[in-house]
Image: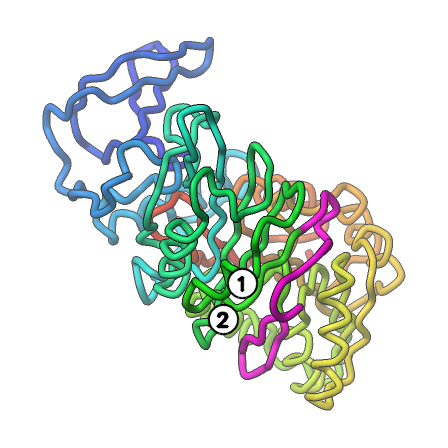
Amino acid sequence: MAGGHGLARRPNRPVVFVPRTAPGERVEVEYVEERRQWARARPLRVVEASPERRQATCPYFDVCGGCQLQHLHYEAQLSAKSGIIADALRRLGGQQVERPEVVPALSEFEYRNRVTFRLKRTRAGVVAGFHAFEDPRKIIDVERCPLAELAVNRAWQGLRAAWGPEAQRLPPARELRLTLRASTDGEVGLAIEGADGRGEPEYLIEQIEDLAAIWSLGPDGLIDWHEGPAELPDRWGGHELLLAGKAFVQVNRAVAAQLDAYVIEGCGDITGARVVDAYCGFGLRAIELAIAGARVSAMDSDDYAITAAQGLAVESAAEVRFIPGDVEERLPRELPADLVILNPPRRGISVTVVESLLAEPPAAIVYVSCDPATLARDLADLSLSFELVACRGFDMFPQTAHVETVATLARR
């Protein structure tokens, strides 16, 4: 599988990407695009079904672009993701690897604490949900998402019921991005992007059970105005966090805890070691490493997260240097180090970061990635000084083709 698409191979012809298919089955298709090296086809009819196929539970699966693998039994999803990681590392990264283990999620459904919906006002009325499977320009109206936590779905259904004709109680704009995030206590915050005015946020909070706060975000991602508390209390790894707007934490609490435990364990005995945690977010991992005896410097470009991390370190009596700013600029100043942890956004690390790590290579790197393709590219760039010694996947996003990967590198 590639990006959740099945692959069909024809003798002396380009490979064909066919979505919503399962390994080993025969499908009647319609070609929609053909290039020199690949083609895309739309499945029309399953002629001979794979034993790995199952009936999707979501009524929107056939038309919604949110999930790619819901038609596969869960064991088959894990196998597909293992193959996606291995294929990317071999083909794009030049790594000689076996298919890695993918740690399963504790729950296939109702795991997302944060969901972003698109709302569009049209002549025919309001449509709000997710991008369509075959046409990303189109929005599929969705009343409930089976991947969302119960509190998020309750707030979404309450919002749809309370926003009124033409969603007039939401801010006026042709299109809005609406992100609902739930705390561990079930309180929900709504972040609105694209607002041109206020609407009636007081009414919405009063009417919608569990909705505690509304934040309107400007083009820079900062909060322009809010109704209700400016921040929402949450708990992660035994720490109290205050979340607001688009402040980033993982969407799957249970798998995030498994991944963090694996990363900490993989660091080994770090007593007295010099550790750099790049793209540290709220710094929870950096704090744990400092408590374990490491000398930690941590950095992130999110000023809000860094300020919160500094407060958490004080509360935990952990000695961590939290450094605000771009990793590209800050990392060279913190090298050399014994261990560097990388947890970049989907685009991966920049050439500048690669050059810094090659110029003063640490003894080890632990790279946490949400995109096997950019991970593979970065490992290829780092291979001059580092070799891959361990790799494990974590199913942070069941029913989708996305997967988190932890790669451990040792200096050559």
Dot 2 lies on which element? loop
Q: Along the horizontal axis of the image, is 68 left or right of 349?
A: left
Dot 1 lies on which element? strand
Q: Along the horizontal axis of the image, is 277 left or right of 371?
A: right
| Number of marks in picture | 2
Q: Return the residue nearer the eye: 317 or 331.
A: 317
Q: Residue at x 77, y 71 (%)?
A: 307
Q: Residue at x 18, y 23 (%)?
A: 27
Q: Return the residue nearer the eye: 9 or 347.
A: 347
212 vs 395: above or below: below
The answer to whether any part of residue 103 appears in the image is no
Instruction: Tell which circle, 1 or 2, labels the residue nearer the N-terminal end.
Output: 2
Q: Are marks 1 and 2 in contact (CB under 8 Å)?
A: yes
Q: Return the residue nearer the eye: 244 or 39.
A: 244
Q: Residue at x 34, y 64 (%)?
A: 150
State the quadrant of the C terminus.
bottom right
Q: Position of residue 135 (x, y in %)?
A: 42, 24
The region drawn magenta spans 217-242
Amino acid carrying label 2: it is Ser
296 vs 18: above or below: below
Q: Along the horizontal axis of the image, is 5 left or right of 266?
A: left
For disc 2, the marked residue is 183
41 vs 330: above or below: above
Q: Is residue 227 magenta?
A: yes
Near mark 2 (Cα within 10 A), the count class, few <14, some 14-19 or many ≥20, is many
Q: Which mark is residue 189?
A: 1
The answer to whether any part of residue 219 appears in the image is yes
State the quadrant of the N terminus.
top left
